[in-house]
Amino acid sequence: ALAAGASAVMIGKLFALTNESAAEKVKDSRQGLKFGVGIGPLMAKYRGQASKDFQNEFYGGLKEKTVAEGTDFWAPVTGPAQDLIDDLLGGLRTAMTYGGARSIKELHRKAEFMEVTAAYEEESKPRRD
């Protein structure tokens, strides 16, 4: 999105799944989610504020002339927010280096896009071989 001209991105879901988020968290006991107990990974409940569940609970329904966006779901907690920030910035720096850009504005000017086939997309995925 940044390379295509955006000056900001919406990545709330990424931060909602970090250790520091205010998202409700439970342990996954492999037999369903159990609050406060269990042996599985820590899970966080992602609640988009435009989701139908959130709007019903907090506003008693959807506002007139609006539609629900997204859904509530449980997902594994990804770790510290600082690790996420470091990963995002590292990826952005790498992309900017590949494109020869020293700033976001320069990235807007220098970015090049190409269409790829489904086979290329599949081949470019990480693998363990």
Image (cartoon, rainbow, N blue to C red):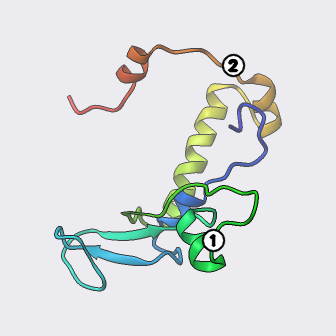
Q: Is residue 108 above or below residue 59?
A: above
Q: Is residue 67 above or below residue 59?
A: above
Seen at 79% across and 44% down, the residue is: 7
Quadrant the C terminus occupies: top left
- Viewer-proximal residue among 97 and 38: 38
Q: Tell me if mark 1 has few (under 14), some (14-19) or many (20+) residues whose alpha carbon lies within 10 angstroms of its own.
A: few
Quadrant the N terminus occupies: top right
Q: Tell me if mark 2 has few (under 14), some (14-19) or many (20+) residues whose alpha carbon lies within 10 angstroms of its own.
A: few
- Residue at mark 2: 112
Question: Residue most toward the bottom?
Answer: 36
- Viewer-proximal residue among 32 and 77: 32
- Viewer-proximal residue among 25 and 68: 68
Is residue 29 visible in this depiction of the protein?
Answer: yes
Q: Secondary structure at mark 2?
A: loop
Q: Position of residue 92 (x, y in %)?
A: 62, 41
Left or right, 109 with reference to 66: right
Q: CA distance from mark 2 to mark 1?
A: 44 Å
**Which quadrant of the figure has residue 54?**
bottom right
Q: Is residue 6 above or below residue 118?
A: below
Seen at 23% across and 33% down, the residue is: 128
Left or right, 20 with reference to 92: left
**What's the residue type where badge 1 is placed?**
Gly
Seen at 72% across and 57% down, the residue is: 66
- Residue at mark 1: 61
Q: Secondary structure at mark 1?
A: loop
**What's the residue type where badge 2 is placed?**
Glu
Q: Position of residue 9 (x, y in %)?
A: 69, 48
